[in-house]
Amino acid sequence: MFTHLFEPITIGNVTIRNRILSTGHDTMLPTDGTVNEELIAYHEARAAGGAGLIVLQVSGVHETAHYTTHMLMATEDHAIAGYRRLADRLHAHGTAVFGQLFHPGREIVEAAGGMAPIAYAPSVSPSERFLVIPRPLSHAMIRDIVSGFGDAARRMAEAGLDGVEIVASHGYLPAQFFSERVNKREDDYGGSFDNRLRFTREVIADIRAKTPQGFVLGLRISGNEMDPDGMTETDTLAVIEALAPELDYLNVIAGTSATAGGAVHIVPPMSVRNAYLAPFAGLVKSRVDIPVFVAGRINQPQEAEAVLTAGQADMCGMTRAMISDPEMPNKALEGRVDDIRACIGCNQACIGHFQKGVPISCIQHPATGRELQFGTLIPAARPKRILIAGGGPAGMKAAIIAAQRGHDVTLHEASPRLGGQALLAQLLPGRSEFGGLVTNLLRELELSQVRVVKGTRVDRALVEREAPDVVIMATGATPYRPDFVQEGEIQVVDAWQVLKGEVTVGRSVLVSDWRCDWIGIGIAELLARQGSVVKLAVSSEMAGKSIPSYVRFLSMATLHRFGVEVIDYARLYGCDTGTVYLQHTASGEPFIIEDIDTLVLCQGHAPDMTLSDALAGLRGEQHIIGDCFIPRTAEEAIYEAVKVASAI
């Protein structure tokens, strides 16, 4: 079934057992700049799951490389011990491991103590996204940084890693030297094409001089920075062809950290098509004689097999696929494709957590990043009869975990379908893949042999009749309707009514968005696509404030293209015929929005407490999880399900 995916490949002195790659990605698990047990457990889960190659998250090569306060640093020999422990644990599972050598240049996110960061780059070329103006590198600093790359590689080789990868992707320091638009130097490191390659060539030479023969050296590079002022495919191909003879492999990606439009491609969300960078990787393969890796929304083994079969790459980065399901490679190898918990590209708990400064996880698999807490399910000491009310993500996951631990579980759902609000979320533009969450949970329910009863609403009488040992309530929420002045004959509807097709909205629409999440911007896009003139009024300083930035950037670009007007700091106050009244959340001053046919409420949700109120005073163990406790997102609902079901 997967003729190419599980074919070994030899690079330098290392033979990699398959073509599945976990690309370098920040986890936020390190706490003091060195490898800790949490990071080892995270990667070991993927190694045990069958990954062929794991590239570690970036390791800083110089004191000026701290682009966040939680990154690994390979600048001192005391770091070797941690890398060695990690390499030994991954090698024990048959997985190869490379390090990533990193300097961000001007792309500095934060500094210790909350102060403004200090950044260095080839020239005074501001970073638009982080609002950083860098200081030009002196010749002495360039020499120090070059030597830092080589020294870091030496430490990783001593630790037993199989190779290293220079990060020249996403507009980081090597790419800043490559770019004519960023590198304005007039010395030996700027100007001509060869001069702009000089820094990276010196880095490569220093690494080769300080590491054993056969130690693998690769380069990660953005084929297209996806920015009007960024590196194009033509620019990058010239760099690739010039440097390839000095390297063992190339790792192709896209985007740049420097701008909103380019940053989307660092971790492309579900609205970006699958394997979209494979054609460029294929072009690279036709120009070089070394292996080519590619990533970018390759979520399923079938997609990776197609890329490999087409000869577009030699290995496929499937990082989020293994964040969602560490066992994905083993399941594919065994032909259990339907059992894979497919990544849905939501970005909520992986890169979304990183952007919040907390360890990454997965909304579908809370054990990711919490391997020491949830990595091993402990069988129940005494099997119990568990009744679960509500078949949304929280109820489904609780049923799965409880059944896997040996409990006798019955899941009741009032409607004819399982899935809860995820069934609505998948109807938003560009969010259809969110429905994969339900597909994955349905398969896990089947494998766990959970008894499911649909079309039955749980009440006190049913609980008393069944007399379970434990009741888990996961009955969800309903749209919240705030108190506001309503007069006249303006149409007022909520997001659920729009998504269910229960209403026909007018030509001129105002969407009042209190949560600033996927719903408001999704409804605005949906109605704009249907031909309405849409205004989106958000209660915060920006639309989509509560969602991961790469999702927000792409959504805001789409809204801009469709002419949606965004009104910030806008609280809903009232409405009458043809007019909606808003209040500025900071000044208290009014906005009067006229000629509106339909007001769409995206005001959050209220917990459905019907069952919890009905069961008050009833003897027995009870738990309330997900939105019926307090409405949030699928991530919190599934996390609470795992936490509760793991403890019963």
Image: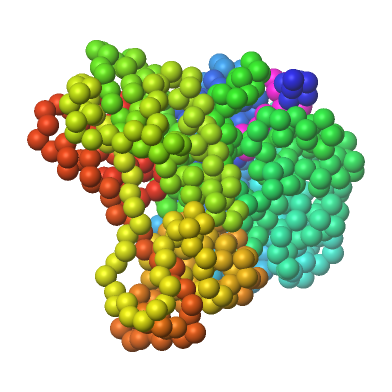
Residue 15 place in picture, x, y as percent:
72, 21
Any part of residue 156 in sight: no
What residue is drawn where x is 29% and y is 74%?
484
- In this rendering, would 562 be left or right of 34? right
Residue 146 place in picture, x, y as percent:
66, 49
Extreme-right residue of the structure: 286
Vertical arrangement, residue 323 with respect to residue 556, above or below: above
Residue 570 place in picture, x, y as percent:
39, 76
Q: Quadrant of residue 461?
A: top left
What residue is drawn where x is 36% and y is 41%?
637
Any part of residue 309 in sight: yes
- In this rendering, would 555 be left or right of 111? right
Colouring convention used in this rendered image of the protein: rainbow
Residue 419 place in picture, x, y as percent:
45, 39
- The answer to if 125 sits in the magenta stretch is no
The quadrant in which the N terminus is found is: top right
Q: Nearer the viewer, residue 508 or 118?
A: 508
Vertical arrangement, residue 566 with respect to residue 345, above or below: below
Extreme-top residue of the structure: 382
Vertical arrangement, residue 600 with respect to residue 284, above or below: below
What residue is drawn where x is 58% and y is 72%?
532
Q: Quadrant of residue 180?
A: bottom right
- The answer to if 19 sits in the magenta stretch is yes
The quadrant in which the C terminus is found is: top left
What residue is drawn where x is 60% and y is 60%?
554
Q: Nearer the viewer, residue 45 or 322?
A: 322
Q: Nearer the viewer, residue 281 or 588?
A: 588
Q: Which residues are magenta?
A: 11-23
Vertical arrangement, residue 140 with respect to residue 304, above or below: below
Number of numbered markers: 0
